Amino acid sequence: MTTPPPARVGDPADAIDTPALVIDLDAFERNLDRMAAFAKETGVRVRPHAKTHKSPMVAWLQIERGAVGQCCQKVGEAEVLVDAGISDVLVSNQVVGPAKVARLAALARRARIGVCADDPAQVEAYAAAARRFGTTLHVLVEIDVGAARCGVAAGAPAVDLAKRIVAAEGLSFDGVQAYHGSAQHIRGFLERRAAIDAAGEAVERTVDALAADGIECRTIGGAGTGSFRFETETGLWNELQPGSYCFMDADYARNLRDDGSEGLEFEHALFVASTVMSAAAPGRAVVDAGHKASAIDSGLPTVWQRRDTDFVSASDEHGKLSLSAAASPLGLGDRVWLVPGHVDPTVNLHDWYVGVRGGLDEGVVECLWPVAARGALT
């Protein structure tokens, strides 16, 4: 059941009921503009990852700035996007199971649908479903470029799989998926670049082997918020799939730049608004946002613009803050803005985005957007 929105358009930001998922629209739009400018300058395609935002509203703002479409991880997410009119969606994942594959093939009646494969059985299932529904699925061979998660081995094994796709009625071979997920959060700048350089060697070997067999790659896709500049520098990737850049989180903020300083080029634009619900002891405050309001798989949230205050632990409905002796005190009802440790699963905890224009302190609620693909796990 979708809950009522925690605010009304026109409310001041400090009137938002908590806990709530809040977008600083000014910072958010600057993030979108930075990525769009990068794509224009370099000539690469950008296909932002909707697993981060789960929102057709965000998707359309990205597409208006030049994105070629969206990618996502689940058929359910793709359905939400297509229902909202998004006409080009890549499920950058393997889809397994008759029900899900059938939904995917049926969706291709209404949009250009891509999907990844790393096993002949997946190719057979995709082709059978596409023939059944009279559609075409655009399939990328996913290769393992270092993450040791999904992906067939680079080179000859990838070519063998591509040949099956080329030969299959109902499928169109679209290229290579080469996403190095675990490289996104390598803290050191040079170490992160080295991981992508190694991934590039696997990509180049695969593309060359495909070309030797007369198979053309329309798409070499992958890259994320933590590495997209490195993939572009190689001259190999032509389609980038960053997700978190639009919002940013506390974990990405720990990545190092080339000068050794922390933080990437994007701004924190997504926050969990919380309220102090207890201040019973000196140096301690408890807010109403715990595990159920902010995911902690990549670390606890950080407290926005209170350097002397740390979020030290969470339980289901409580977040405990520790205040240094020099920190300004917090009392009952005070507003505390939290930067999630990991934006993707945090978004999936909420029904609504509250968009604030003019800053978190003095801003006004401008929009309310449903997290339309929340819970789309299949």
Image (tube, rainbow, N blue to C red):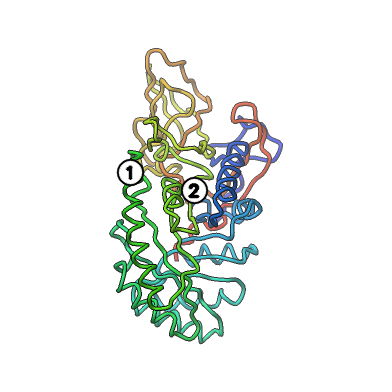
Specify few, some or many for label 1: CA neighbours under 10 Å numbering under 14, 14-19, or 20 or more. Answer: some
**102 to 378, vertically: above or below:** below
Labels 1 & 2 near each other (Cβ < 8 A): no
Percent position of residue 10, x then y? 71, 36
What residue would you read off at disc 1? 186
Q: Nearer the viewer, mark 1 or mark 2?
A: 1
- Residue type at the position of mark 1: Ile
Check residue 347 in the rendering and tell me which mark sits there, or answer none: 2
Quadrant housing the N terminus: bottom right
The residue at the point 48 percent across, 29 percent down is 304
Q: Secondary structure at mark 1?
A: loop
Does residue 317 show up? no
The image quadrant of residue 249 is top left
Percent position of residue 228, x then y? 45, 49
The image quadrant of residue 8 is top right
Percent position of residue 181, x then y? 37, 53
- Residue type at the position of mark 2: Val
Specify few, some or many for label 2: CA neighbours under 10 Å numbering under 14, 14-19, or 20 or more. Answer: many
Does residue 352 show up? yes
The residue at the point 34 percent across, 72 percent down is 158
Q: Secondary structure at mark 2?
A: helix
